[in-house]
Image (spheres, rainbow, N blue to C red):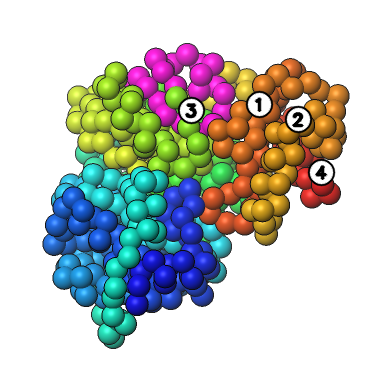
Amino acid sequence: MNTQQVIANSNIVFGTSGARGLVVDFTSEVCAAFTHAFVSELRQGIAPKQLALAIDNRPSSYGMAQACAAALQQAGIESVYYGVIPTPALAYQAMQDNMPCIMVTGSHIPFDRNGLKFYRPEGEITKADELAILAVQVEFDALPELPVLHASSRAAANYCARYASLFAVNLLLGKRIGIYEHSSAGRDMYASIFESLGAEVVRIDRSDQFVPIDTEAVGEADKAKAQLWSDKYQLDAIFSTDGDGDRPLLSDETGTYLRGDILCLLAAEFLGIEALAIPVSCNSSVEVCNSFKLVKRTKIGSPYVIEAFTELQAQYTRVAGFEANGGFLLGSDIDVSGVSLSALPTRDALLPALAVLAKAGDGPISRLVAQLPAIFTASDRIQNFAIERSLALIEQGIASPNVFLTKLSLGQFEVLSIDTTDGLRIALTNGDVVHLRPSGNAPELRCYAESNSIEKARLLVNLVLSRVADI
């Protein structure tokens, strides 16, 4: 079999973060083809003897990891399996060991889909690496019987130690923290981390079924549950993540979840970050707050944020990035209150949540949010919306933005500016913003809106998506 042919015929494509597709299309041969292609690309510069693997809690993930391990065996590489752990835990351990790795995860997308994330020893692969993996041609044999994988606990333990040792043991003393566990890959470690920092932990709503939590478009049912839990258990905050533990959910004391970019903005302030790389979809408060020397906007997706780090690192010593989903990427080694913290240039859920809790101190999280500029973002999506349809809509908007606004029932407003960095982002003269783009991970059309109140932003999103369906 040939890697390029198998991948081309698989319906699996690279999205904003890794290769994604339907589980039925992620056959053992397809997983093997991606693994062999990745190894071939690695061997252009290094000769790896080991490669680390880990998975999320999706029913399909273990079998996919077995196929990757079998392909590694064919390639003469030993696989080091860490079981079910968060993506940043795998990435951190692999980087400490100067080892490449593969994470089997579909992140937040439904359980009938899955994915593969690839890391070089220095971190997440680039878009150029993705193209190289798709272009390489490696011949490989049919896989033998898939191996049984035995998980090491080393990566999980070291990830916990990274944050337990960063803050004082009494950081959260007197705080009641709810951990919404659902099916998150990190659910077995989060309680112990928060308890080690002095918190009283309430573990909530663990699920044996995979729950596709999207931290960028939290469902109304999940929002309502958080407020009920906060009142029932008298919580100071609720912490959770998406499926693979690289995107956080953190609520304030009322059970109201912070948007990911607001969470990370507060975290970056606490960490003393000088320069930030963030996608174009993030809240404009990042610039308006004047807390950072430089803010660079990128296309949506962690590879683009990471790509921007090279430029920022040449000028600044404390570099980071984040996405609107809350994933925080630490682009340089920094010290936090005299304790050294090594760079982790991949999305992480724990660091921003703990940093915001540290910044809040004895006060409520809501007070931190209230001190930020009054710019509010809402977002939602239309699922099962073909990418071709999304792209056609965006082309309409670029060609005739004023006509497009009329179709969206926004014809009473004028266009201030247009940004086509990723999708179509229209700034209106009244200060509102509407941003449409196709998801890179699933057939979905996403809409982001900014306004001077959360109610107005939500109404704007609902209006746009309702009109888009009719265009």
* Residue 430 position by quadrant: top right
Judging depth in this view, the residue of 343 and 202 nearest the camera is 343
Write down the region rendered in magenta. Answer: 272-295
Q: Residue at coordinates 56% horizontally, 62% vertically from top-left? A: 110
Q: Amino acid at mark 2?
A: Pro
Camera-nearest label, 4 or 2: 2
Q: Secondary structure at mark 3?
A: strand
Q: Residue at coordinates 39% horizontally, 59% vertically from top-left? A: 134
Q: Which mark is residue 418?
A: 1
Camera-nearest label, 2 or 3: 2
User: Could you classify mark 1 by the number of other residues whose Cα lies within 10 Å: few (under 14), some (14-19), or many (20 or more)?
Assistant: some
Q: Secondary structure at mark 2?
A: helix
Q: Amino acid at mark 1?
A: Ile
First reached walking from the N terminus: tag 1 or tag 3:
3
Q: Where is residue 300? Give x, y as percent.
A: 51, 39
Q: Residue at coordinates 44% horizontally, 62% vertically from top-left? A: 115
Judging depth in this view, the residue of 470 and 330 nearest the camera is 470
Residue 175 at least partly seen? no
Q: Secondary structure at mark 4?
A: helix
Tell me if 216 is positioned left or right of 318 in this view: right
First reached walking from the N terminus: tag 1 or tag 4:
1
Residue bearing the label numbered 4: 467
Q: Compared with residue 350, is residue 454 higher up or lower down, i.e. above or below?
A: above
Q: Which mark is residue 297?
A: 3
**Residues at discs 1 and 2 in contact (Cβ within 8 Å):** yes
Mark 4 → mark 2, Cα distance in angstroms: 15 Å
Q: Where is residue 398? Give x, y as percent.
A: 70, 33
